Image: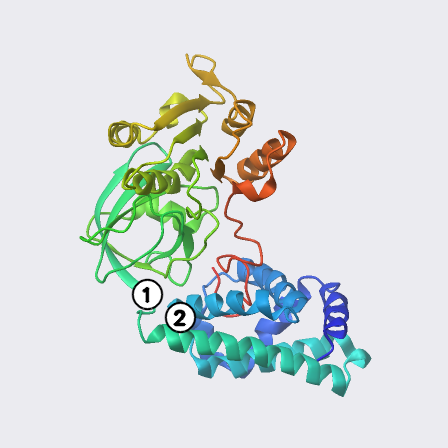
Amino acid sequence: MDTARLRTSWHKVTDFGGGVPLFFYSTLFLTHPQLREMFPAGMSAQRDKLVRALGTVVSNVDDLDSAVPFLQQLGRDHRKFAVTAEHYPAVGQALLATLEHFLHDDWTPDLAADWGAAYKLVADVMTAAAGEDEQSSPPWWNAEVLRHERRTLDIAVLTLRTDQPLKWLPGQSIAVETELRPRVWRYYSPATPPRDDHLLELHVRMVDGGAVSSALVQAVTAGDVLRLGAPVGSRLTLDHGNDVVLVSGGTGFAPMKALLSQIAQEPVPRNAQLFLGARTARDFYDSPALQALDRALPSLRVTPVVSDDPRFPGVRGLAGEIAARYGPWPGREIYVCGSPAMVAGTQELFHAAGVDAERVHCEDFTGYQDPTEAGIGLLKRG
């Protein structure tokens, strides 16, 4: 398999932009119309993910040490979409037909063989991982909404109880689907560690154009049942015994709350400094939880930071800016969660302050290592 030839051909195909995913899905649904019902009604976001996903896989297909763990997680993750081994050949046929259509004379028997081998590798790894996972885990968990608390105009806190045990590490993310937005999944990080009573807490901010977040904040009520996918991600989990600095913006506090709860259960809790960012003082939506953590974790120090409220008597600015300024935090691990812009800006600030990049931990849902936004993505990303 000539991986250089694969990359070159894919770069040529991507020059055709949105026509590529449009042709792919048209081919897939024309040849296998029964698959259409597996996808959300609106396909625009799905088409965008396809191009990113294929580029990711092709660019790394020759690096098995990196590609295999990623593809295994992706195969497990696709179980919640009701994807089975029987679906992969249909996707492969549509993919090869799409490549042939756009490459024209450049589509040679040798190149077709390369693409067929690359796709078979991807499909084999994903299906094997899904089959193994099927022996121990359901494709999804049903979770009843026990409480729905509207904390601010655009933020709700949901308390859920799953019908089966669901284990995750604080800092991981879980896909959520509501029947109000069928076949569209969004990822949220639980604000609690796993509990014996199967309870978990989600913090949801309504975003512009966010179909799932709008439904979870405005329409879901106690008694409704959501679907949850298997936990994913590892970049925000505690993998060191070092003291920590936590920097959160908005509902990015959720995984930090879970991490602090985990730290409070340690035999000798490590030191923790939390920089809690919000636009205004009214946006500190979970103050009782902070007070409870303060009592449970004497080693915790909290610095509330407000960016857009000149009347706020405390520290004003951006949480990441303040946290970096209070540094350099020798020997501490830095954990960051918030909006993509907030996370990227905070990373740059710590880098400018001389903090090594490997000490700054944040999830990247568009990167190769995490399947929540990247991945082959051919089957149902919403």
Q: Quadrant of residue 266?
A: top left
* 340 sits to left or right of 266: right
Q: Residue at x 54, y 70 (%)?
A: 68
Q: Which residue is mark 2?
A: 79
Q: Residue 83 sits in which quadrant?
A: bottom left
Residue at 19%, 52% in the rendered image: 223
Q: CA distance from mark 2 to mark 1?
A: 8 Å
Residue identified by numbered label 1:
140
* Secondary element at tag 2: helix
- Residue 276 % position (x, y): 42, 29
Residue 85 got which mark?
A: none
Q: Amino acid at mark 2?
A: Arg
Q: Is residue 368 found left or right of 42 in the rendered image?
A: right
Amino acid bearing label 1? Trp
Residue 338 visible here: no
Q: Residues within 10 Å of mark 2 (few under 14, many from 20)?
A: many
Closest to the observer, 269 or 172: 269
Q: Position of residue 284 (x, y in %)?
A: 36, 27
| In this picture, residue 63 sits left or right of residue 230 | right
Q: Does the CB distance between marks 2 and 1 fall below 8 Å?
A: yes
Whichever of callouts 2 and 1 sits on the residue coming sooner in the sequence is: 2
Mark 1 crowdedness (10 Å alpha carbons): few <14, some 14-19, many ≥20: many
Q: Is residue 65 visible?
A: yes
Secondary structure state at the residue bearing disc 1: loop
With respect to residue 267, does 102 lie above or below? below
Residue 381 x %, y %: 48, 62
Instruction: Give x and y (percent) for residue 211.
Output: 42, 50
Which residue lies at the image location 81% right of the left edge and 81% below the top edge?
A: 105
The image shows a total of numbered marks equal to 2
What residue is shown at x 76% (from left), y 74% (from top)?
A: 5
Residue in the foreground of this view, choosing between 220 and 375: 375
